Structures are given as C-alpha cells and as structure tokens.
C-alpha cells in the first residue's frame, strides 16, 4: 500500500465530496505493520499537497519522514490510534449538517439501516468545548469514541470519521453527513425520527462488519 499517495488522493476527495473547504480538516492513515502514521501537513490546500508533503510519525509523535509541519490535530489522530486498535484511517471533516448538531452539543442517533451498519453506535458530541489543536481536544475526542463507535462530533468544530481502512472512513463520513441531513429535515418539518431496536442495530452492525460483501 502506498500510504503517501493514499493521503494525497484522499485530500482531494474530501474537498470534492464537500466534507470540508480550504485547508480545514485533516486526514491520516495508520500502517500497523511498521507502526507509522501518515498525516496531512498543516495549513496547506488539499490540491497543493504532494507525496513529499505527507508527514510520517510514530505513535509517540516523533517525525520519521517529511519536512512539513503535520496537521495541528496530530494529537487527536495519535490518541485515537492508540486507544482504538481497529481504526486504521481517520478523516476529520467540517461538513454542514453534522456541524449544525456539533454546534448544539447534540448526539446523532442511529435511525436508518445504513447508520446502524456503518456508525457503530449513536454519534456522540464531545462534552466540552476545547480549542483546536490542543491536548484537551484530543482527549475529548477519544472519550467520545468508545469501542466500536466509528464517528463523533467535536463541539462547535466538526466531525471525526474513521474506518478499518480509508474506504471505510469515507463511507463513515458520507453516512454521518447524510444522517445529520436527514435528522435536520425530519426535525425542521416538525417530525421525530423513530429509533431502531438495539437488537436490530446489533444484528446489522455485525452483518456489515463481518459478513457483508463477496465471498464472506
Ligand atoms: Zn478541524
């Protein structure tokens, strides 16, 4: 796997898909075999990032390769990889509808089958506001991502979307934003989303994670 290429291409993709604008947001991938984390550089437009700009660190934050400063949210990425052994890719987004809930400190429940299959639990919003790039923000995010949860909201800031690979992280980001938009539309037309029973959510999560796809 060419992780540097993956980061460069994923950067172009998050802008194309409307998950962020300008230089906001950041992306990483974790190569568990040699313990390397590949991160987007700080404050560079996604269409200007090339493979030499990708910063490679170990889990303790020591720079192994690259001359750029890594994203200011490096601590958040490293914290999540250390806390969650199943996570191998992280996309930090600033998308419209998820942000509406992040700014209200609200969680996003799972009320559709696709949310049940991809989000791994109610999407929690961090409990306290913290400044961008701080150790406190990283701690809040790790707390809002207990086992199996694949996404969380950062209060007044955005969302964190993860997966066992980059493809899954993009699916998480897509489903989270679609779910937030659906919830907004339900609420703005005076409605209420009816929840799905936990046993059905559990069944779909297990199926999507372990059995869905060709040849499983
Ligand atoms: Zn951000």
Image: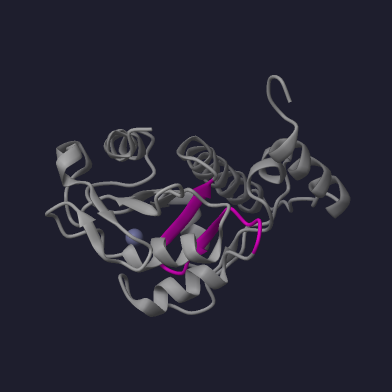
Tell me which corner region of the image, top left, top right, bottom left or bottom right, holds residue 49.
top left
- The residue sitting at 46% across, 75% down in the picture is 139
Q: Is residue 161 magenta?
A: yes
- Residue 26 position within the rendered picture, expressed as x and y whole percent measured from the top left: 32, 52
Region in magenta: 147-163
User: 117 above or below 134?
Assistant: above
Res 130 seen here:
no
For residue 42, side relative to residue 77 (left or right): left
- The residue sitting at 38% across, 32% down in the picture is 1
- Residue 61 position within the rendered picture, expressed as x and y whole percent measured from the top left: 30, 66
Tell me which corner region of the image, top left, top right, bottom left or bottom right, holds residue 69.
bottom left
Q: Quadrant of ligand 1?
A: bottom left
Along the viewing direction, whichever of 10 and 23 lies nearer the viewer: 10
Residue found at the very far top of the displayed protein: 214
Along the viewing direction, whichever of 65 and 105 lies nearer the viewer: 65
- The residue sitting at 56% across, 57% down in the picture is 85
Res 84 seen here:
yes
Residue found at the very far front of the displayed protein: 34
Residue found at the very far left of the displayed protein: 67
For residue 162, side relative to residue 15 (left or right): right
- Residue 168 position within the rendered picture, expressed as x and y whole percent measured from the top left: 53, 39
Check the picture and name the quadrant holding the C terminus. Answer: top right
Q: How is the image coloured?
A: one colour
Q: Across the whole image, how many numbered discs are drawn on residues?
A: 0
- Residue 116 position within the rendered picture, expressed as x and y whole percent measured from the top left: 72, 45
User: 130 above or below 150?
Assistant: below
User: 54 above or below 148?
Assistant: above
For residue 215, side relative to residue 154 (left or right): right
- The residue sitting at 46% across, 50% down in the picture is 32
Q: Is residue 214 magenta?
A: no
């Amino acid at each position: 796997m060419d992780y540097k290429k993956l980061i460069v291409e994923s950067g172009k993709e998050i802008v194309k898909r409307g998950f962020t604008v300008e230089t906001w947001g950041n992306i990483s991938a974790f190569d568990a075999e040699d313990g390397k984390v590949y991160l987007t550089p700080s404050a560079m437009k996604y269409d200007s990032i090339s493979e030499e700009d990708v910063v490679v660190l170990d889990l303790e934050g020591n720079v192994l390769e690259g001359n750029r400063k890594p994203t200011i949210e490096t601590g958040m990425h490293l914290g999540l990889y250390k806390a969650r052994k199943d996570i191998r890719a992280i996309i930090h987004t600033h998308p419209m509808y998820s942000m509406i809930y992040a700014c209200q400190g609200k969680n996003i429940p799972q009320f559709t089958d696709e949310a049940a299959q991809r989000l791994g639990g109610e999407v929690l919003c961090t409990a306290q506001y913290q400044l961008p790039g701080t150790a406190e923000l990283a701690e809040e995010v790790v707390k809002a991502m207990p086992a199996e949860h694949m996404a969380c909201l950062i209060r007044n800031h955005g969302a964190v979307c993860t997966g066992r690979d980059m493809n899954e992280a993009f699916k998480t980001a897509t489903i989270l934003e679609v779910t937030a938009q659906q919830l907004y539309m339900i609420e703005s037309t005076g409605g209420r989303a009816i929840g799905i029973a936990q046993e059905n959510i559990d069944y779909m999560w297990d199926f999507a994670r372990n059995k869905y796809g060709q040849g499983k």
